[in-house]
Image (spheres, rainbow, N blue to C red):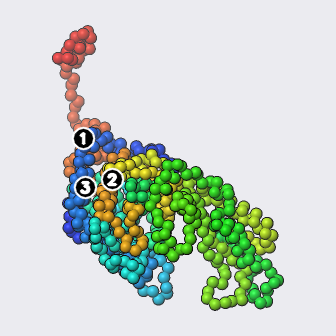
Amino acid sequence: MKEHKSHVRLPRRSKRSSSRPYTGSDDELPFGPSQACRCEHCAIRNRPKPTDEDNLRSTAMLRKVDAAVEKNFEETLVDLEDFVRLQSVSADLELIAESLKALCLYRDRLERMRFNIFEYNINAPRGACDTSPHPKVVFAHYFSSPSKNTILIYAYLDVAPAKFEDGWLSEPFEFYMNDDMLYGRGVCTGKGMAVCWLQAIEAWLELNDDLPINIKFIVEIMHAVGSVGLQHYLEVKREFFLDVDCIVFGNNSWINDDKPMMSCSLTGWAHFGLEMRGAAKTLEGGLAGGLVYEPMTDVCALMNSLVDNLHVLQIPAIQHMVRPTLVTEWALIESAIFSEYAYKEQFGIRRLRFELTKAELLHNRWCQSTMSMHGIEGCYSRKGSSMAMPMSVMAKFSIKLLPDQTVNLVHTHIEEFLRTKCEELKTRTNLKVHLLDSCDPSMWGLDARYSKALVRSISRVYQLEPDLSMNIVTCLPIASTFKKITAKPIILMPYAHRMDYSHVVNESIPKQCFLRNIKLCTGLVHELSLLPARCKCDVIFEYCNRQGIAEMLKPHTEKNLHRPTIFAHMRRTKSVKPRNQQPAEPDPNKRKNLRDWLCAPFRRKRMSTTK
């Protein structure tokens, strides 16, 4: 593992041309000094409340930042073109060098913006003779001040495979514009989202020399292949998430072209292994056939009992745990832009389930728990024929979990159902049900403070309120993994229109929509800066005493005035008398005047004080 760290330098003007554990609602979190904070000059306690003048000043700064984004938009398109030209296809090991070029390009841009950079090698599975470089993941941190909120941005730079022969109008890794549309592989997914954040941060630094919040980045190049190796670093580098207030993910969650939709829930999953064992070792079919019970036959019978001929899950207890869909959400589903014919043509599918209405099809996709079968371990799966009779096989299947469904309850219902079926079928092989992998679904309130901040930012950019939903669940496994490991609040930023083509032929996004996405990033930074910060001394020792870029920008005289040293505090509390010095004798006239004033009537005292 190689770690690359850049040291913090004194801030200077940015040049664009140069190349807490979360256990409930956000509003329940303590946003004052924690009991573990022993800092007398706590940055949270001494932070003044923003006045109306401060709010007007910050709003004016946001307008200047948006103006700078529009002014430098041509440079933004050049940056997007630089990333699109790199064939960062993570599924192709021969192109891992191109993916590393994209990651290094992004890392250098962050480093020039005074981010602390940490690089880690990903130990992905590879052949014995493979000499290609290891993929990497970048952790970056911009620390402005302990009195500011901290967000973590997840970004990825790899894309799905694309070839010109698949029907592209031009080379998929050649960026071009046509009729105010931006074309190229990645403009509507990871590369486009990452460039938006890059330009938003540079616009803030160009005008202010500092950011109004603390920002952390996790940038990877293995997203398209399941984020191989990233979960290891999420578990090992847990200290990186201690001061994070919320995690931001980009999400293609538009349902129609009328308005963006903001989802407030994430799916979970439960991967099971159905193991059947009949003997201690594999037997020969020609010799032992007809003498023993075959586990493969029982596995097929049990797997077939889980669903009916329409592939509907046959465990009512699991389906009863799904919350009903609201009337407003049915209206959203019916307004969704979805072409059944185009979907079938894209993947070569003859028929789809629930083809009677589009709403039923999408409702089953977004709002219902479904089961998928993945394979059988221990059987003969190579080419050709074999007489081997496996005596221990394990079928693998998974269930998509929705809010109100928990892994423990689903596991219990699955095991009870399978054991009941074994008794009905009178199987003579031994059954074991294994929970191979799991993640509980998550859901947060529509009135959570970070969700409100995102709603305000969307309303400002698009001039309309976004659609909010908790029952139309978003399937984003990497976000669910972050939630499972870090237990931090999550917000999903709606990135692109439904009319856009992501991960398909001729991937594109409107030019104006891409500009709005940059403004959405700048607006979210502004809205999060207005929220009260939480003291983190309970998780990070003396967090309030840390100095960031904001403290470095302050004059030393001002810093010493507001943060006196401990020796100055001691001089104020203790009076040290000089040696060999006699105490001064009291003045008799002064004592007499004080006695006369104390003995005077109250009326005369008030007249003397008013004068």
Residue behind mark 1: 53
Distance from disc 3 to disc 1, alpha carbons, whole Å, reads 20 Å
Q: Nearer the viewer, residue 440 or 563?
A: 440
Query: In terms of image quadrants, where is residue 77?
Result: bottom left
Q: Nearer the viewer, mark 2 or mark 3?
A: 2
Residue 60 can be seen in this image: yes
Which residue does the image show at 72% across and 78% down from the upper left? 296
Residue furthest front in the image: 356
Residue 73 on image: x %, y %: 24, 63
Q: Give the residue displayed 54% in from the left and 60% down from the top.
A: 357
Instruction: Look at the image and tell me in which quarter the C terminus lies.
Output: top left
Asked if residue 353 lies left or right of residue 103, the reply is right
Going from the N terminus, do you reach mark 3 or mark 1 first? 1
Lateral position of residue 572 relative to residue 499, left or right: left
Which amino acid type is marked by label 2?
Answer: Tyr
Is residue 22 rendered to the left or right of residue 384? left
Query: Which residue does the image show at 67% across and 57% down from the upper left?
Result: 316
Compare marks 1 and 2 and give the one earlier in the sequence.
1
Residue 42, quarter of picture: top left
Residue beneath disc 3? 66
Pointer 2: what residue? 462
Which circle, 3 or 1, is nearer the viewer? 3
| Mark 2 touches mark 3? (CB < 8 Å) | no
Q: Amino acid at mark 3?
A: Asp
